[in-house]
Amino acid sequence: MTIEEMKKRGLLLFECISGSRAYGLATPDSDTDIRGVFYLPKEQFFGLNYISQISNETNDIVYYELGRFMELLSKSNPSILELLATPKEFILYKHPLMEKVKLSDFLSKLAKDAFAGYAMTQIKKAKGLNKKVFNPIDKKRKELLDFCYVLEADQTVHLKTWLMAHSKQQNACGLVKMNHAKDVYALFYDAVGDKGYKGIVRSAQANQVSVSSISKDEEILAYLLCKEDEYSIHCKQHKEYWDWVEKRNDARYQNTISHTGGYDSKNMMHTIRLMLTAKAIFEWNTIQVWTPHREELLKIKAGDYSYEELLEKVTQLNEEIEALEAHSDLPDQPDIAFVEKMLVEMRMELYG
């Protein structure tokens, strides 16, 4: 089912502008996000083709099926709860039946973890972006040989440097694992090429060194240290970095590197907005969608604060939220039986 089909069939229950415009944080380059609620026709709801949500290609426009909407409300999902507190000027359509769904029936102490707990997780992740933005990884992945070293006298020499200095080829080498010495191998060399040594690695893509059958009378040329664990970490980081490059939002990336904070400032702004919203929930038993903190939040988006300053602010907000939650008269969680009864009654009315 497409959005157009849903509306044409008269299945829309609620529609509003959400995101930055509803928060009072929109700037000239802000998108317009639309969120809403719809219901499935009776035969589709009772049949096999249940659809929980529909959206456009960019997910700027998303509609939740009534049952999914109520489920998310009962779990105190922040973005869904905020829809019930949308300022009137941002509501585009509201079916009379939606008057039954009141914010007061869904606010509970679950909001602490749903809003503040999620925000704390995002704050910690934000700094991780710094490593990707300011520590780029070459497109060409390193090979295992780049993590191999030769123990020579009282020093450690990079394998490739050692091979070049001694005019030797890696594919003419033979290795034997040393007992009781992690990642250490005895290294032999076949200058003639008639001993069947397998070389140090069989290909540039190898993820472990090769061992060879060596005669007992062969003389050890050197000892090799291969840091396979470090190579595995490098491969993982390389994949993560280039997956991120492929999927990253270039506009947000350019914004991040334009300031010295080393964090995704737009994400950080919305994260702290969630913390401020959580605090207001326990102070006033309601949700304040249109923020009174626009100036401060836009300064965060502009990167005017260091990560350390923001972390200190978040820590303080979290302590205030925990203290307010401890003395709040909100229920521990929504009354699920009541929510279920409401949902059944709404469907019965919709289906006649």
Image (cartoon, rainbow, N blue to C red):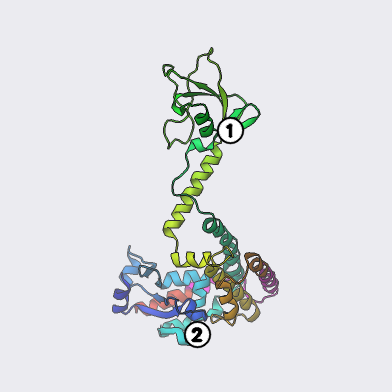
- Residue bounds of the magenta highlight: 315-340
Q: Is any atom of residue 38 visible in this view?
A: yes
User: In this rendering, is residue 157 above or below 130?
Assistant: above
The dominant secondary structure in magenta is helix
Marks 1, 2: nearer the viewer:
1
Q: Residue tagged by mark 2?
A: 87
Whole-percent x, y for residue 24 in the image: 52, 81
Whole-percent x, y for residue 316 in the image: 69, 70
Whole-percent x, y for residue 201 in the image: 46, 31
Q: Secondary structure at mark 2?
A: loop
Along the line of sight, the residue nearer the viewer: 2 or 293: 293
Q: Residue tagged by mark 1?
A: 157
At 58% from the left and 60% from the top, the residue drawn is: 127
**Amino acid type indicated by mark 2:** Pro
User: In this rendering, is residue 294 above or below 49?
Assistant: below
Side (left or right) of 230 relative to 62: right
**Amino acid type indicated by mark 1:** Val
333 inside magenta stretch: yes
Which is more N-terminal, label 2 or label 1?
2
Q: Quadrant of the C terminus?
A: bottom left
Tell me how far mark 1 sits from mark 2, CA to CA.
Answer: 67 Å
Kindly indicate the quadrant of the structure image that contains residue 110.
bottom right
User: In this rendering, is residue 308 above or below 155?
Assistant: below
Whole-percent x, y for residue 146 in the image: 51, 38
Q: Residues within 10 Å of mark 2 (few under 14, many from 20)?
A: some
Along the line of sight, the residue nearer the viewer: 92 or 147: 147
At 58% from the left and 62% from the top, the residue drawn is: 121
Q: Secondary structure at mark 1?
A: strand
Along the line of sight, the residue nearer the viewer: 285 or 230: 230
Q: Residues within 10 Å of mark 1 (few under 14, many from 20)?
A: some
150 inside magenta stretch: no
